[in-house]
Image: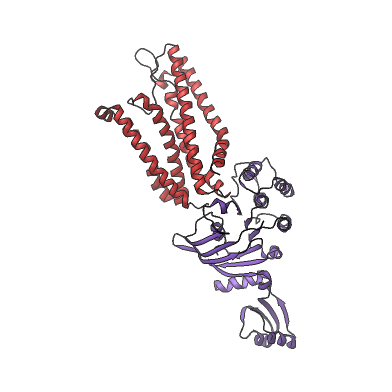
Chain colours: A purple, B red
Amino acid sequence: MTAPDITMEQMSLKYDSVTALEDITLRLTGDKIYALLGRNGSGKTSMLSVLSSFRPATSGSVKIGTEEVFDNERATLQICFIRDDKNVYEEETAKDALAFAANFRPNWDNAYADRLMNMFQLPYNKRVNTFSRGMKSALGVVMGLASRAPITIFDEAYLGMDAPSRYQFYEEVLRDYIEHPRTIILSTHLIEEVESLFEEVIILDQGKILMHETLEALSQQGVTVTGPAEHVDAIAQGMTALGEKQLGSTKSVTLFGILSPEARESIKQLNLEIEPIGLQDLFVHLTKKQKGV
Amino acid sequence: MTTKVFQYLWLSYIGIYMWFWGVLFVLAIGGWTLQASDWADWLLQEMNETGNWTYGIWAHLEQSPKVFLFVTGILFSVMVMPSLLIYGISRRTCFHAALRKCITVSALFVIIVLSAHMLEWGVARWLNQVYTFRFSTQEVWVHPAYNGVKMYFDMILSFVSGWFIGLAFYHKGWIRGIGLTIFGIAPVIVIGIIAQSEHAYATYGTVLVSIGLLGIYALSLGLLLVWTRRFISRVAIR
């Protein structure tokens, strides 16, 4: 069964007088892994909260398939939104939390939840409020993955986990996604760690969509050219430079945009170094520029 | 889904209810022991001129379930409701399930209090003690047939007031929450004043005052529920 598409049209969100999201128009097709990137305060959690019906949008529309999301169980029961905390009632034991999820999540997989609990070495009979930050994050991950919700969202949910646990999580996301395709949205600051999972990337900045591209398209949109300063400047002319560094006469310029065949030929003739820009670098450069830092 | 959530709300509270009523019954047993041993003359001060106890222990304990329901109403808004909403349960379902729960749990509590009260009254008569069958909020007798109904509405109103106040704080923040608390507790205060007004009974009679009070219950419950529904329909999960 294919996960439904997500459509946002001219969606805005205001907190009193502060605009958190402005005029968001976005279409996410089902059964893909998406990255939602943005600096702190860019509106990522707000956007995911509206998508998950945790809060109403101030204006505009958010749909899952053809259903408006807000307060609509036909839509909301298909979404599992895991945050960095408050995913369960922390006065209860992990066992109770899992039983609660099993009761209300339509696609809940008990056996898979047990396997994940063992994998992350989480105790069933301890109260969640006695868990360490990492254990709470791991429990959130268990709740998210075992929900098998057609739209599963992790918002920095694995931030408290140690590196080995995080890598286990990434492997598990991919393995389970292949076995049970669904839409997974990962909001993260640990871009390099998880980059290989993404199929499409959405970058939010100051409450607006800065970019929504496939990972492949994004990787072609930026290059770093390194060589003698005068040659590099000549290549960079007429292009958007995202950043530059200079050491003596050697200069390195990060360019945004697809290089023309002529530029590529010049680079080859001038013997300049060229390498694709990483997603994290592109993100840093793009959001830095937008922030005017 | 409403029925499923309603069942969950009942099942998840059964242990808490058993604890609560267990504690109340222990208090009642303690009270009877004190009365039987006459150790509590100074405490209860309820003896009449003939040396009989005028009121039973349950006349003092029947406020506790209302306070309990008031507190569970507050906790429903700030703890239970968010934990349901994050699982994709709609606000509408949450509201209807909680309302059903409030109506049924209030009925159960009234049955428990009245049963305990009547049992105590019967035993007192058997022991040649003459208790007046009364409730602690009543300084003046309300129409006897109205007592159970009044208590039922009191229970519902207690939960709804707590629910509304909790939601006001959760949804509107501290400052507006404090302001809205006034509206949440106003019906309880107004009803209390009228129910205990000798002047009202002397002027209008118990039947008319009882009908008037029922009208106030209906009006205040209606307004609070409409307001609560409006708050829930736009509440954001924190």
Depth check: A270 or A66 in front? A66
Depth check: A268 or B9 in front? B9
In the image, taking residue B176 as reference, residue A5 lies left or right, namely right
In the image, taking residue B55 as reference, residue A176 lies left or right, namely right
In the image, taking residue A245 as reference, residue A208 lies left or right, namely left
Q: Residue at x 34, y 37 (%)?
A: B216
Residue A24 x/y as whole percent: 53, 66
Residue A59 x/y as whole percent: 47, 62
Residue B232 x/y as whole percent: 47, 49
In the image, taking residue A255 as reference, residue A14 lies left or right, namely left
> In the figure, B76 relative to A82: above or below?
above
Query: Residue B157 lies in what quarter of the image?
Result: top left
Depth check: B226 or A241 in front? B226
Q: Which residue is drawn at 41% across and 27% down?
A: B148
Residue B185 in sight from this viewpoint? no
Query: Residue A293 lies in what quarter of the image?
Result: bottom right
> In the figure, A97 relative to A231: above or below?
above
Residue B165 in sight from this viewpoint? yes
Give the number of callouts.
0
Residue A88 x/y as whole percent: 60, 47
> In the figure, A10 relative to A257: above or below?
above
User: Where does the N terminus of chain B fall, quadrant-wise?
Assistant: top right
Q: Which residue is drawn at 64% across and 64% down?
A: A35
